[in-house]
Each structure stands twice: as C-alpha cells, then as structure tokens.
Amino acid sequence: MIFDDIPPAPRSLAANWFWLLPRIAFALFVLAVGALLLHYDKAEKEEQRSILISDVLWLEQDLRFLMVRQEEVLGQIGLQQAASAASFEAHAKALIAGKAGLRQVAWVDAGGSIRRIYPGEIDAYVVGEARGTVPSRETGRLAKSLGKAVYSAPYPIVDNDWQFEVQVPVFQAGEIVGLVVGIYSLRQILDDSIPWWLAERYRISVTDSAGATLAARSKIAAKEDLDHYEIPFDPPGHGLSLYAVPYREPAPLAGRMLSAALVLLALLVLWSLWALRRHVQQRLAAEEALRTEYAFRKAMEDSIQIGLRARDLDGRITYVNPAFCRMVGWEAEDLVGRKPPMPYWPDELFDEMRTIHDRILAGKGPTDVFELRFKRRNGELFDVLIREAPLIDAHGRQTGWMGSLVDITERKRAEELARQQQERLQATSRL
C-alpha cells in the first residue's frame, strides 16, 4: 500500500533509557579519560621525583669525592713546600685553579701561628663575629687530637656569601708539624662543581639546620610548591644540606598532545551526543507530525463516500479506501496487489473495461469524468462516475494513477423514474 500504518510513539520508559544510556556511557568515558590523565600525571611526577633524587645523589657523591680529594691534596703540602713563600704560593695557586671552591690556602705551624697565606689576608673577607677568629683554633685543636682533617662550621663573609674551613694535619716522623688550612666559599663550590645541565633543571642551594639558605647556584627562584629533595652535605657537615628544587618545565610534547587529543575526543563525543539528541528530537517531532497528519487523513478517508483507488504504472492496485471497498463488496486485502482482470469487472463488459484500463495506463484515457459499470461481489451491477489523475511522488515522478469513484446508481435510477413520470404526465395531458 502507498500509506503504511505508522508505528506508535515509543514508550516513555524506553525513551528515558534511550537518553540515559548515552549519558552514562559519556560519563564513564569522561571518568576514564580523567583517570587516565591522573594516572599519566602521577606517573610523570613519580618519574620526575626519581630523576630528581638520582641527580641530587649524584651531586652529593661528586661533592664528597671532591672534598676528600682536596683533603689529600692539601695534606701533601709539607714543611718543605711551606718553607719558602714562592713554593707555597705555587702549590696554593694550583689548588685554587682547580675549580673546587677553594678561596684561600694557609699554613699554620705547630704552635698555631699563621706562617703562609694565599691569596690576601686570612680574614680579608670575613664579616661579623667571625672576624679575627680565622682559622678556627677549636677546629685546629680537634684536627690535631684526631690526627685527621676536620671541618669548621660555616660563617658569613662579604657579598652575602658563607665559607668554611678544612684543617688537615701534616705529619713528619710521626709528629704533627703543622696544619694546612683550606678555606672554601659555599657559593664558589656550587658554581664550580655543579654542571650546566644540572643547573638548568634545578635550583640547588646549601641550607643550614634551620632551613636558611646560605648559598645558591642560581638567583632565579623556583616554585616552592614543587617537589624538592634535601640531602646532608657532609663533608663539611655541621647541619648543612644540599637542597634541590626543580624548575617548572613545560610538559612533554607527547603528553600535551595526548591530553589535548583526549579532551578533543571527549568534546567530540559530547558534540556527537548533542547532535544525535537534536536529530532524534527532530525526527520524533516529524514522526509525531506525520502521525497526526496520517490520523487526520485516515479519518477523512473513512468519512467520505467517494471511493479512492490507486494503481501503479503496471495497473496493479496499490491502495483502496473503505468507501471503495463498500462499493465493490471486496476487502482491501483482496484487492491490493491485484492486476487485471479485476474482480469487479462485469464479464459482459470485459473488453470495454480492458480497453479503457490500457488507455488510462498509456496516458490516453479520458481527461474528464466518465461513466462505467462495475459489479459487486454479490453480482449486483452498479454505475460509477470516475475521474483519473496521475499519481506524483515527492520527487515529481509519476508512480501511477489515482482514481476517484462516485456511485451514481441511485441517482440514475431516480433520473429514470423522473423521466418515466414525466412521460406519463405528458401522455395524460394529451388525452
């Protein structure tokens, strides 16, 4: 048939589930994306933390090796090298040129008197209460009593720097004949010992036991809210620590691209869901309008007394309305799909019916209304007035023919009765 029954509107529960399931799926997708990003961020932070610890441990070991090596080199300056100013100065220059943070080298005899100092004066850089106490006598006594190198506590010097001493006892024939004093600048140690690649990653500083910064490799402040790592700086000890804070580095390109792709995918899914919802709503609205229109058309077709019959280009019946079925006495199921000869054609008029049928299909049928005689299922003949028109689809193509039929049997019978009465009246008047 041309017009099929439109299915009823979906139930509200089904409609609710139809929209609820995509929303649940999208929420789960967003949660999965969020969990993935959190996992990625956590893994990245753990990796950065591991690299930070590894780098700081490497730096601490490198500084430890440097300080121990410097102890050995300082201990090689004996009475013979300290005997002349030129010899001592040559050894001191070589040590300071080694880029190990050494600022001054001094020779102290067994009595505690300073015999040699290079460069400058022993307390030329000292400020505050430490002035006049360099080198530390207490550190010297401890070095002599222990027979090994001892480090002093740090003390302030000019330019907001701090320095400390290492006093190394010098033995001759089993006796301590003096002390070699190496004076280190904390800032110079960091500048000389920290490689550029490490300085680009972290702000490395030396802090005391109270957490105050005594020296730093860079003047650029790092974000204190970032992860950091602290490790004892020993030697020299005395509560000093190496404190490293990473600079905030841009996220890796691959990670940023992954995050952007996931966010874009989530937005795309959200847009697709919105577009699908809008499309379905429009479709449901169109179906509802079509359903209303169909109900209106169906009510009109059922109420009119004019029979409607549609045929395709091959002459096959594709649609009949209830009025047509009542005219011929056949059900729609018996007529739809039938090709000539039709069951409502009278046998005695078969040739005439066939001729008119073929002319209509060929487009040569009557352009105005015409009369035919049909046969009901019970064999009764009746007269119909027919008008045929081309059946055009939505694309403007002809798909068949639509005919409207009016039963004029009673009208013709009334006309015949009126004619007979008129004739009788005329005959009577002549008498």
Image (tube, rainbow, N blue to C red):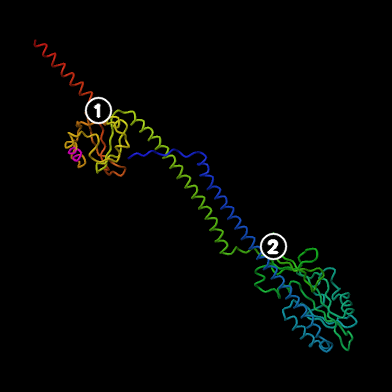
Q: Which mark is residue 407?
A: 1
Q: Is residue 9 left or right of residue 203?
A: left
Q: Nearer the viewer, mark 1 or mark 2?
A: 1
Quarter of the view holding residue 182: bottom right
Residue 30: percent from the left, percent from the top?
57, 52
Which quadrant holds the N terminus? Answer: top left
The outermost residue toward the front is 378
For numbered disc 2, what is the local secondary structure? Answer: loop
For numbered disc 1, what is the local secondary structure? Answer: strand
Residue 215: percent from the left, percent from the top?
74, 68
The outermost residue toward the top is 431
Amino acid type, callout 1: Asp
Q: Is residue 162 left or right of residue 112?
A: left
- In this rendered view, identify the residue nearer to me: 345 or 188: 345
- In this rendered view, identify the residue nearer to me: 424 or 241: 424
Residue with the mark numbered 2: 227
- In this rendered view, identify the residue nearer to me: 75 or 360: 360
Amino acid type, callout 2: Asp
- The boundaries of the magenta stretch are 354-359
